[in-house]
Amino acid sequence: MVVGAGVAGLKAAITAAQRGHKVILCEKTDKVGGILKSEQALPFKYEMYELGVVLERQAKDEGVEICLNTTVTPEYVEKEGVDALILAVGSTPLVPPIPGIDGDNVIIVNDYYLNKDKVADSVVVLGGGLAGCECAIHLGMEGKKVELVEMRDTLAADCNIRQRPILMRKVAEFSTTHTEYTGQKITPDGVVCKDKDGHEVLVPGKTVICALGQRANRADVDALRQCAPFVREVGDCVRPANITKAIYEAYHAALDI
């Protein structure tokens, strides 16, 4: 059994099936693909969304049984009589408990593809990692006025070193950036931040995109780690990173079975 049908879970399921195992792939939502689903809204990242589509097709071609809307519990694993369990339960967006974060004008970056029609003409992207920078570029290319806020002094520290110079040029072209700004509260008019000198500054925008990173779903891992003779953890539930790491870990975990 593979738990979680993001890129890591799909690759693990495919590899295990290719090696002759009967594989059940369980996904708690109604679609496979994980974070890759969110890439369909960004034209320059659409091929990453298509990777999830291709992996789903490969899994079906290899005879993987895909169970959607299925939350896996220890009892469920026991009922299925699982010999090997690969945990690919992913990560959850970091959403800090700052005032206004639950407002109607706030969209979590992973959910942008579901809410893109709600985005106003002026936007604050809160979080200047790779995901935030790419979202800021996309929104700027659509003609929106974009303010990009990052609490560190460097943007996209998690970006590939070869890609980063290109990314930085596009960020400068399509957005106004504010580094060493820390979000304090969200209002209908934008994000109130503290700059590096401790002064409060309003960064204006009618919509706020929250792109503050991901947290590994360790509680889900801990609940299942003792449920089969063979257990492996792969992908973002180990440590949020990138597609390459997720596929590498998933492939080798399936080879170990």
Image: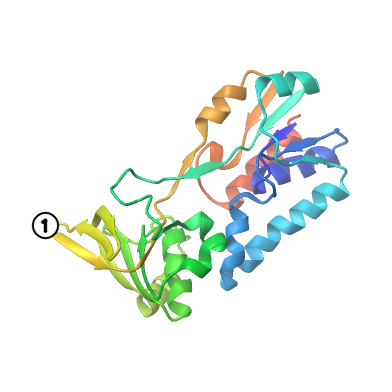
Q: How many marks?
A: 1
Does dot 1 land on a helix, a strand or a loop?
Answer: loop
Of the pair 245 and 116, the residue shown nearer to us = 116
The answer to whether residue 62 is left or right of residue 50 is: right
Residue 141 appears in the rendering: yes
Of the pair 124 and 44, the residue shown nearer to us = 124
Q: Which residue is mark 1?
A: 197
Name above or below for residue 28 compared with residue 213: above
Name above or below for residue 117 compared with residue 224: below
The answer to whether residue 233 is left or right of residue 11 is: left
Q: Quadrant of the C terminus?
A: top right
The answer to which image quadrant residue 204 occupies is bottom left
Name the colouring of the figure: rainbow
Residue 212 pos. (x, y %)? 39, 52
Name above or below for residue 24 compared with residue 148: above
Q: Quadrant of the N terminus?
A: top right
Residue 137 pos. (x, y %)? 44, 72
Give the residue type that dot 1 points to: Asp
The answer to whether residue 144 is left or right of residue 182 is: right
Residue 136 pos. (x, y %)? 42, 69
The answer to which image quadrant residue 123 occupies is bottom left
Q: Residue at x 58, y 23 (%)?
A: 223
Q: Residue at x 31, y 52 (%)?
A: 100
Q: Residue at x 58, y 67 (%)?
A: 41
The answer to whether residue 172 is left or right of residue 4 is: left
